[in-house]
Each structure stands twice: as C-alpha cells, then as structure tokens.
Image: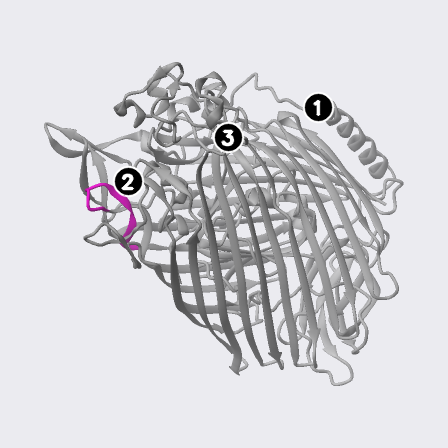
C-alpha cells in the first residue's frame, strides 16, 4: 500500500540522468575498512550454518509488587548478553503492557526498569517464530540500573490524541552515517530537509508540512533549542550529539503545551541517555567523500557504588564540503553523570566544543545545476566567509518519585553562544561603513551619490572589505513539572521560566589598501552597529488525560505564556546621526488543545484533536538593529512628529487553528497509520505583507493561509529479516487571503496571491525504505521523492511590466523541480560468538544514482537562488566496542 501511494503522491518527477565517469574523493581508509569487512564477514559465515530466521516476539506486563498495580512508562529493553548493547526496546502502555515484535532469534538479556523500583534482569533464549510471555513485578527500592526515559513532556503513542513519529537509538545509529540530524528527520512524514553545504555537514534546515523550522519547537531533554529572539534552530551547533540520543519524537501540527514552547508547524523532542549499567569503551573512525573524516572516543564507567554512572565522549569531524568554501571542522565534547537514588534520578549532561566552518548561505542560479563545476560555486568563496563559534550547553535534570502516584521532574539549564563570522561587504555602501566624507575609497574620493551605492559599483570586489559580526549570548531556565498518575488518569502541571540576553556588534575586520587603517580592525574603535537584546519567557501549563470508559481516552491541554522583548543599549550611526533606540514589547497568549482517542492501547485505534496556537514576531521583525547603519526603521506606528509608538507594533502575532483526525492498526507483521490535517493560519508573517508610508514593501502579515492534507505511514515484514517501511503526504498549502507588495518598475505594486501555493511547501512527498538483515549483515535502500516547490509566493509566475501595465509571466526559474534521491547502506556487526565481537563496519552511499538535484530555493535581491544536493558520495566507518 505504501509503495503504491508513493507513486501516486509524488507523481512523475523528471528523469534524472546517471552520469558516467563520476569520481569520489575518499581517503585510503575506505579500502582498508572494506577489506576488514570482507574478512570479518567471511570468518563469521564460514563457521555458521544457515538457521531459521523467522522473527520472535516478547510480550508481557509490568506491575508494582505486591499490589499488582500497572507501571506505565517502564523501560523494557533486550540487550546483547555479551556486550550489553541495546538491541530492542519499548515502554509499557497505561495498563503496564508491552510488546517487542520482529525480534531476531537468539539469546538476550531482558532488562525492565522504572525510577524508584529495583530493576528486573533475566536471560532469554528465543527460538525462531517463538512468542515469549512474561509478567514482571517490580519492588520499590534503589535503582542501580538503566535510567528511565523522561515521559512527562512526551506524547504517549496510541493513547495521547497527537500525530507523532518516533526514531529509536538503534534507528538513528544505523541510518545517520556522518550527516547531521536534520538529514535523518527529513525521512519522517511531511518533512523536507536541505543542506547549505550540500553534503549534510554544516548548516541544515527542516520544514514540516511546509512550515519552516522557526515555527517548529525543538527541545533536548525538555530544554528549548529555538533561539528566543530569532526562533531559528541552529543544528550546526548540535552536531556530534547523535551518539547520545536515546529517542526522538516528532510531533506534527500545533506543538503541545507539554513542550513548554509552542510550535506552529510541529515539535521535535530529543532525549539523550548515554548511561549504561555495564562499563565499555568505544572508538569510531571513518572517512569518505569530500575528504570527510571522523574520530570519536567514548568511555562509560558502568555502575559505580550501586548509584553512579559516568559517560564521556570527545569527537572531531572535518570535511571539505561539497560546495566551494563549505568546509567544516567540529571538535566536540560530551560529559555526563547520573545518580540513581532510592526514589529519584539525577543527571547532569554537558556538551559543546569549537566549530569552524566556511559559510555557504547563498545558493546558485538554476542554470548552474547542469554543470558539475558550476553547481559547486559559492558566492561567499571569493571573500572566504568563515565562522568561529562555541555553543556549550549544560542540562541538570532531577526526577523524584514522591509516591507511586506523584512524580516531580525538574530541569535547569544554561546555554551559551559566543563567536563571530567574517563576510565580504562589497554590497554595503560607504555610508553604511561610517566612512568619513574625505576618506578615499580605493584611492578615489566618493561623491554624495556614490556614498549611498554599494561598494562594488565603485570598483571594489567582495574580498576588498571584510566585516565581522560578533555575537555573545546566554540563556538560563528552569522547567519544573509535577505529574499525578493512577492508571486511568494522568495530570501534568508545569512552569517554564527563561531569561535570554545577547550582545551583537560589528566592525570592519579587513580592508587592505581599500580603506585607511583608522576605520579597520580591533584597534580602530569603529563599530558599525552595537545593541543588546533581552527576552523573558514565563509559562504555566496543564495537561489532563483521563479515561471516562475503558475504550476512550480524553486529553485537555492549556498553556498560558507571557513573553517580553527588550531592545536596549543601541550605539548605531546612520546618515541622520547617532541612534540609541530602546523599547520593550510584551505578549500574553493562551493556547488550548482538546483531543480524544478511541480504543487506546488497542491494535486498532483512532483519535481526533483540535488546537489553537499563537506565536509572537521575531525580534528582527520588530527592528533589525544590524541594518541600523543602512537606515532601517523600527516596525512600529509612526507619530506625526516622526517618533515611534512602541506600544503599537505594525506586525501582529500569528494564529493557528489545527484539526487532526488519525488512526492506526498494529499487527505482528505490519503497522499502518493515516492522518488527515486541516491547519488554518491567520496573520502568517511573510516577507511582503504591506507597504510603509513611503510605498516601500515591508515584512507583514498575510491575512489567511491554509495547510491541509493526508499523511500515510506504514511498516511491514514480508519475509523474515526483510522490513519495508514508508510514508507519503498529499497536501494543499495555499494562500487564502493575501495581497503581496513588490517593487516592479520602480513602483510598489499590489499582487493578489489568493489561491497560489506557499513558497517552499511541496504538496507531494514520499519516503520508502527497505532493509534486509541476515546474520550480522544489514543492507538498506532509502528512496525519497519530493514534489514541485516554488521559490516565492507567485506560484512560479513572476511580475513584470508590459507597455506600463503589470502582467504575470510563467517562469520555470522560480520552481524547484520534483526530484527523487536514492541512498544505500551496508552494515556488518560481528556476532558475540565470533572473534570479532564488538566490531561494526558500515558503508553509507548517498545519492546512489549520482543525480543533479536542487533541494530548496528562495528569491533574493539578485534573483532566484537554489541549494544543490551533493552528487554520489560515500562514508565508511569502523566502530569497536570493548
């Protein structure tokens, strides 16, 4: 069913040629690792007969002893008896029941744990096709074993009326390779991804149901990751944390109040849990295309003194990147401590490091995609744009089971961001750079008119003047949550308190002979802009899940949140003189949601939900202080005397009503689900929503937009060892009521966009993955197909003038063509019974057919620009666990 819908959803993407003579740059390590893979596989297979590999299963129930009351949310894990590595895992439902299906026959260690209870460990030998049944009773006492994945901020599948998809630790480990996390999340339903560097290492961006990641609430261990002022998620700052991830849950639709911050398009909740009860050391080394190299060393102490576990990891990744000047060098660290008490768990996790990378923010013209050389071009390469940044984080989590029914979970965190980026400034003017009137630029004194023009118009190139933008910010927060749960009722009460402060400034870093030394460098005291920002966030949220009857679960959520921007300490000059604007803008929102699930925890279940969500504008949409030298004005009502009324912003908050209907069917060999969504969006903030008093287009609100569609997802095991999974989306993302203003022929023109597609929102999307496991070998193919996208809001029809009249012309250059990409991987993990126990070798090949694909596009000042996907590329990695 999924395969058929895959074709129907995507339609007929254009045929992508397979080019001959393609070369890949890879280190000598690749051939060595392939040789080791062959030797290990030969040694393993020659010593073993071919057994029956029909999958087995483990089903059962976890309860409290001696009362027999269920323990929902208990961890149930099957581990390798020799290495302790996790093979299969799940958590119990609201009745304490659990199922582990599709388990390969063999010997395992079954571990069941729950905070405040003694763990249960037993050995299992599963024969082909066997279903083992077990009832586990846990007694309250100290917990010297696996930490429980915190569930207070996560939706419980098949019980909570929420549209979710999850990725477990073993899926992340097998599928990701050397790329960053968005490349894997892009396989989840209704999600697209693109990489500015082309090869998935560096700056990457996600979209869910057509909503950009500024409208997606991302958290790690409950800690919000969206920048409080910009709302963006900088995945590049999180690169290297993937080996610590225990689970990722992706929620589509209006974000749950249980995540603290509300997402418009969805929410991504990441849980890291690297702590294991057994000691081990692990080394990972790999290399591949574009001179990509990775080295990682991890050490885990195992249980110390019946209470403590220490975990530490250091890693380094370096890559030239696919595009010019798209290199990356990431040195990362991770350190963690877990303490398990009689009724509580305390964890401290810290991660960060130094990242240095070449910037590739700007895309390529569409015509460049046809050339192997031209599609690698990067306008930032000429000026050697670079970044140096340190993004450490510290998370402190304490979970205390006060009683069998009451749990207190609280998280405190600190996030720091400090660094700079250097970039060419030939597009800036002499006025923007605050150059004195008598200063010669490139040996020439400029006229008043020339001072207002970009420097390239007076003969300066992009590398003649380099600007440095500096950022120094930090954020602290506390999120306490109280949970009451008695088997049929679950009530969650929580608070969120956050403080974010930032300092931004810029200067002329380099200029060579083009500018005098008096305005260049750190000794010149010639800052072009400087300002401070502050944001205070406070929220209270409550969720109540109850079962009026056994066949029905009802959940009601409510969040009250207040946010306050403060902009202050501005020290900026423009043509009108010194600017020192200060303003404070508060917001207060109420976000409710109500839903119900029919037949929760049953093989066949269905749900319905309705939610309302509101989000304030970004701070730069109120005033972009970095553009102050260019004369940028605050986006507030202007009084007759020219002053601004900071109590009346021109841009309104966004409002969303989200209605979801879904259902799922789970059987031993297959799982299917379907979701219908209708998302009505009012006052969406878009690039051109009106004109100012001078008739100049500005950022503003689109009156009404709509995202509606159907999502399908399924997994099936046609034969033992063979798994087939996929998802597909058919959607309609359109403006319902929107007038866009663009400057055409020197005048601001009103363009009616009612009924046109929303930019960067594909309406057809599908993924298909097939894998086959045999002995320790696993082969996988993944195909992703994405339908047509547009780079602006014109629906592929550009505005132009004809005899003085405004007309619309069809223009293929404004579209991202439909595409399909095929990826493959081959993994060998030596069985514990062989001399190679603890060894894993993996080869990943992306874009197997070597197709020229553009994944995303936008329309900028210089016209449409696009981001290409790298051609065929590979990465081979060896991992050894001792």
* Magenta residue check for 654: no
**Of 466 and 17, which appears nearest the observer?**
466
Mark 1 burial class by Cα count in 10 Å: few <14, some 14-19, many 20+? some
> Label 1 belongs to which residue?
27
Q: How far apart are marks 1 and 2 (CA)?
A: 44 Å
Which residue is situated farthest in the bottom direction here? Answer: 67
> Label 2 belongs to which residue?
795
Q: What stretch is highlighted in magenta?
A: 691-705
Residue 138 locus on image (x, y percent): 78, 76
> Label 3 belongs to which residue?
524
Which is the main secondary structure of the residues drawn in magenta?
strand
Q: Distance between the residues labelled 3 and 1?
A: 45 Å
* Magenta residue check for 695: yes
Residue 809 locus on image (x, y percent): 21, 32
Q: Is residue 57 above or below residue 824?
A: below
Q: Which of marks 3 and 1 is nearer the N terminus?
A: 1
Numbered disc total: 3
Q: Earlier in the sequence, mark 2 or mark 3?
A: 3
Label 3: state its secondary structure. Answer: loop
Q: In this view, does 447 lie above or below 255?
A: above
Identify the residue at image location x=40%, y=44%: 625
């Amino acid at each position: 069913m999924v395969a058929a819908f895959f074709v129907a959803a995507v339609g007929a993407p254009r045929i992508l040629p397979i080019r001959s003579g393609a070369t890949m740059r890879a280190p000598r390590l690749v051939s060595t690792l392939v040789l080791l893979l062959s030797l290990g596989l030969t040694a393993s297979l020659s010593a073993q007969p071919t057994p029956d590999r029909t999958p087995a299963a483990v089903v059962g129930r976890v309860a409290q002893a001696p009362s027999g009351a269920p323990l929902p949310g208990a961890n149930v894990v099957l581990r390798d008896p020799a290495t302790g590595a996790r093979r299969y895992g799940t958590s119990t439902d609201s009745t304490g029941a659990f199922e582990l299906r599709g388990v390969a026959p063999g010997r395992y260690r079954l571990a069941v744990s729950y905070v405040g209870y003694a763990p249960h460990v037993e050995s299992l030998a599963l024969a082909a096709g066997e279903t083992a049944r077990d009832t586990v009773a846990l007694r309250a006492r100290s917990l010297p074993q696996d930490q429980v994945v915190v569930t207070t901020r996560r939706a419980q599948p098949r019980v909570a009326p929420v549209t979710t998809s999850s990725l477990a630790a073993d899926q992340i480990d097998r599928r990701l390779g050397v790329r960053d996390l968005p490349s894997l999340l892009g396989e989840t339903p209704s999600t697209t991804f693109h990489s500015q560097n082309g090869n998935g290492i560096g700056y990457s961006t996600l979209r869910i149901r057509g909503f950009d990641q500024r409208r997606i609430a991302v958290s790690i261990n409950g800690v919000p990751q969206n920048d409080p002022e910009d709302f963006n998620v900088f995945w590049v700052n999180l690169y290297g944390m993937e080996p610590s991830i225990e689970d990722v849950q992706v929620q589509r639709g209006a974000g749950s109040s249980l995540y603290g911050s509300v997402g418009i398009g969805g929410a991504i909740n990441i849980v890291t849990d690297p702590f294991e009860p057994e000691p081990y050391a692990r080394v990972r080394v790999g290399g591949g295309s574009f001179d990509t190299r990775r080295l990682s060393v991890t050490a885990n102490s195992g249980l110390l003194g019946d209470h403590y576990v220490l975990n530490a990891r250091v890693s380094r990744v370096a890559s030239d990147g696919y595009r010019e000047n798209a290199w990356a060098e990431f040195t990362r660290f991770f350190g963690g401590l877990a303490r398990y008490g009689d009724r509580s768990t305390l964890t401290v996790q810290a991660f960060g490091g130094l990242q240095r990378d070449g910037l590739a923010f700007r895309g390529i013209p569409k015509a460049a995609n046809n050339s192997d050389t031209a599609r690698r071009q990067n306008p930032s390469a000429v000026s050697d744009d670079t970044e140096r940044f340190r993004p450490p984080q510290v998370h402190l989590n304490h979970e205390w089971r006060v009683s069998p029914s009451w749990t207190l979970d609280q998280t405190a965190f600190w996030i720091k961001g400090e660094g700079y980026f250097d970039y060419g400034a030939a597009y800036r003017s002499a006025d923007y750079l605050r150059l004195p009137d008598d200063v010669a630029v490139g040996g020439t004194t400029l006229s008043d008119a020339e001072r207002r023009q970009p420097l390239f118009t007076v003969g300066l190139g992009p590398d003649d003047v380099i600007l440095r933008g500096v950022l120094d910010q930090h954020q602290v927060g506390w999120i306490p949550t109280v949970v009451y749960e008695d088997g049929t009722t679950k009530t969650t009460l929580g608070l969120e308190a956050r403080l974010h402060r930032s300092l931004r400034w810029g200067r002329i870093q380099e200029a060579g002979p083009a500018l005098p030394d008096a305005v260049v460098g750190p000794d010149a005291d010639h800052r072009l802009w400087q300002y401070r920002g502050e944001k205070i966030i406070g929220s209270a949220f409550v969720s109540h899940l109850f079962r009026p009857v056994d066949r029905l679960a009802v959940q009601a959520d409510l969040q009250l949140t207040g946010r306050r921007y403060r902009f202050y300490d501005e020290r900026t000059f423009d043509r009108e003189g010194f600017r020192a604007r200060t303003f404070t803008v508060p917001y207060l929102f109420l976000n409710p949601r109500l839903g119900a699930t029919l037949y929760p925890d049953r093989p066949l279940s269905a749900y319905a939900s309705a939610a309302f969500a509101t989000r304030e504008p970004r701070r730069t949409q109120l005033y972009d202080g970095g553009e102050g030298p260019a004369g940028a004005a605050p986006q507030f009502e202007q009084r007759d005397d020219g002053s601004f009324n900071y109590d009346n912003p021109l841009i309104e908050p966004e409002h969303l009503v989200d209605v979801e209907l879904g259902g799922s069917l789970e059987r031993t060999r297959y799982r299917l689900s379907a979701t219908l969504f209708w998302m009505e969006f009012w006052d969406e903030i878009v690039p051109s929503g009106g004109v100012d008093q001078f008739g100049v287009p500005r950022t503003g609100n689109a009156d009404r937009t709509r995202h509606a569609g159907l999502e399908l997802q399924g997994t099936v095991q046609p034969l033992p060892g063979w798994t087939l999974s996929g998802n597909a989306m058919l959607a309609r993302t359109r403006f319902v009521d929107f007038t866009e203003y663009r400057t055409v022929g020197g005048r601001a023109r009103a363009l009616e966009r009612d009924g046109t597609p929303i930019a960067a929102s594909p309406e057809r999307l599908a993924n298909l993955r097939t894998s086959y496991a045999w002995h320790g070998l696993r082969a996988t193919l993944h195909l992703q197909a994405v339908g047509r996208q547009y780079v602006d809001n014109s629906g592929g029809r550009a505005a132009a003038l004809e005899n003085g009249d405004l007309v619309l012309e069809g223009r293929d250059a404004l579209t991202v063509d439909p595409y399909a990409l095929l990826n493959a991987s081959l993994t060998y993990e030596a069985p514990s019974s062989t001399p190679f126990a603890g060894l894993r070798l993996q080869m990943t090949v992306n874009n197997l057919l070597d197709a020229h694909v553009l994944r995303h596009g936008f329309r900028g000042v210089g016209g449409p620009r696009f981001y290409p996907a790298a051609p065929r590329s590979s990465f081979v990695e060896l991992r050894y666990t001792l």
